[in-house]
Amino acid sequence: MMRSLWTAASGMIGQQFNIDTISNNLSNVNTTGFKLNRPDFEDLLYQTTRTAGTPATERTLVPVGVQVGHGVKVAATQKIYTQGSLQNTGNISDIAIEGEGFFRVLTYDGTFAYTRDGAFKIDSNGQVVNSNGFRLMPEVILPEGFIRDSFAISQDGRMTVKIPGLDDPIDIGQMELYRFVNPSGLQAVGGNLLKVTNASGDPIGGQPGFDGMGKTIHKFLEMSNVEIVKEMVNMIVAQRAYEFNSKAVQTSDNMLGIAAGLKR
Amino acid sequence: MIRGIYTSASGMMAQQWRMDAVSNNLANADTAAYKEDRAVHKAFPELLLRRMNTNVVSLPMSGEHPVLGSLDKAPVVGKLGTGVELNEIFTVFEQGAFKETTNPFDMALEGEGFFVVQTPYGERLTRNGSFLLGPEGLIVTKEGYPVLGQNGPIQLKLNNFMVDEAGRIYQNREFADDPQRLVSMAENEWNQTELLDQLRIVEVDQPRYLQKQGSSLYRTTWDSGEATEATETERAVVRQGFLETSNVNAVRQMVQLIEINRAYEANQKVIQSHDQATDKLINSAMTMR
């Protein structure tokens, strides 16, 4: 009916999406290893109603075409992988990554998922699992009867633990981290997990602390990298933009009312 | 029928076009590097009115003196405007404000100029420097179109590139070759820094005549002229880690909304007046009892 009505509506929908993203960032302000999302907007296609360069008269050309836009769309939401601050928990199964890289876990359907959430647990079999019970890969199994407080992980991912009867700690494995050419292309699937996509590229594994991999910091957790102030400012902008667009909808509606008022 | 009705109808239609442009500006108030559209109106061609079927014969005037030797059977009454139409919607390339993002793939342009993007339809221009790293390690736009440097698409690695104000991209040679070797911010000592490429920044003679393509892309047209490489002195400054915000001024758009609404309303009143006058003529001036 009226183009501007839909154009302004697309603006409102876009800002609503913006608020959705901000809300999600804010609600995850305390989520371990959470990386904030940022929506990116782009203008929608333009309708050309008169093409520039077409003849206006015998000798002259139309100098400027008439193009009118159709509003806005969400082009992408990217995760911003800046380092979150580290929090000392003292818990023996907590691991934080300082720098780049992801832990790999095996999900219930047999596929791998990647996470920066290092709040692992030790289950009844002595296996290191995440909060959902997904195993850390490569698998880490602590020997039977191990001494809890002796479990240690070095910055380059070597894991050692003591067992009763032996003086020296025994080596129980090497932790691996994984990186991606384009980590923004990973797909968030909830539960602090990310899945590989065509856009992210294949995982590249490596030892922590070497070849560009981050260090594993034992007994620490990485906090969310959401900055409240920034999100608040974004929220103000989004709310006002929403309001402006609603005014455009109102004006369009008003104009339609006026047009309808032509016929008494 | 009644000329005034069509004249004011053209006024209403023209206001609707302006409304479309304003709505699009407001919808893109938060789009990176969006440039405001402005609608300009122009008067319809004026009509020269002449009196026809008259008994009076006058001599045509040349200046103040009548010209003898010819007769004007339809003397000129005067000129009559026939309304308004949309002339053009043009883009205002004012600089937008900068927003710091600290994302190394975000680049803002300060000054006139455009980045060049390789699309399947040919090279397109953009000022939206919110780029990503593609799976092959190319810098791409949100649509996946590679951003072009002097030597074509730019292949680099996260944490292993820096862009200076002239758009020159530097990388550390040490980590550049092996695609399996990713780099972290902390380990990169920049001991073998080399110039990788320079971002292409182009200018057009008449940016106002560029055609918007959606997705923040522009196309050159016959009127805008071909895109030419910006000279060393006039190159727009590239700011890495910043985004250019939309240059839409919300206050101005709001004022325009009010103005449009009222102009639309005024035109409607004119139509109603014409309608009422006609109504009087038909139903009241000559009543048959």
Image (cartoon, rainbow, N blue to C red):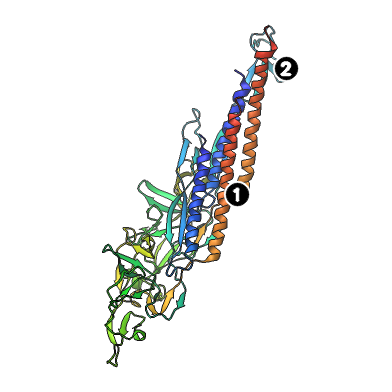
Residue A160 percent across, percent down from the top left? 31, 84
In the rendered view, tell whether residue B48 sits above or below residue A4. Answer: above
Q: Residues within 10 Å of mark 2 (few under 14, many from 20)?
A: few
Q: Quadrant of the C terminus of chain B?
A: top right
Q: Which element type, helix, strand or loop, lies under badge 2?
A: strand
Q: Quadrant of the N terminus of chain B?
A: top right
Residue at image point 58% right, 41% down = A250
Front-most of A98 and A29? A29
Left/right placement of residue B266 relative to residue A105 reads right
Residue, far right: B64
Decide if residue B154 is in sight here.
no
Q: Residues within 10 Å of mark 1 (few under 14, many from 20)?
A: some
Label 1 sits on residue: B250
Q: Which element type, helix, strand or loop, lies under badge 1?
A: helix
Q: CA distance from mark 1 to mark 2?
A: 57 Å
Kindly identify which numbered label has been placed on residue A22.
none
Left/right placement of residue A136 relative to residue A184 reads left
Left/right placement of residue A264 relative to residue B213 reads right
Residue A168 percent across, percent down from the top left? 29, 91
Residue B195 percent across, percent down from the top left? 40, 67
Label 2 sits on residue: B65
Q: For mark 1, name the chain.
A: B
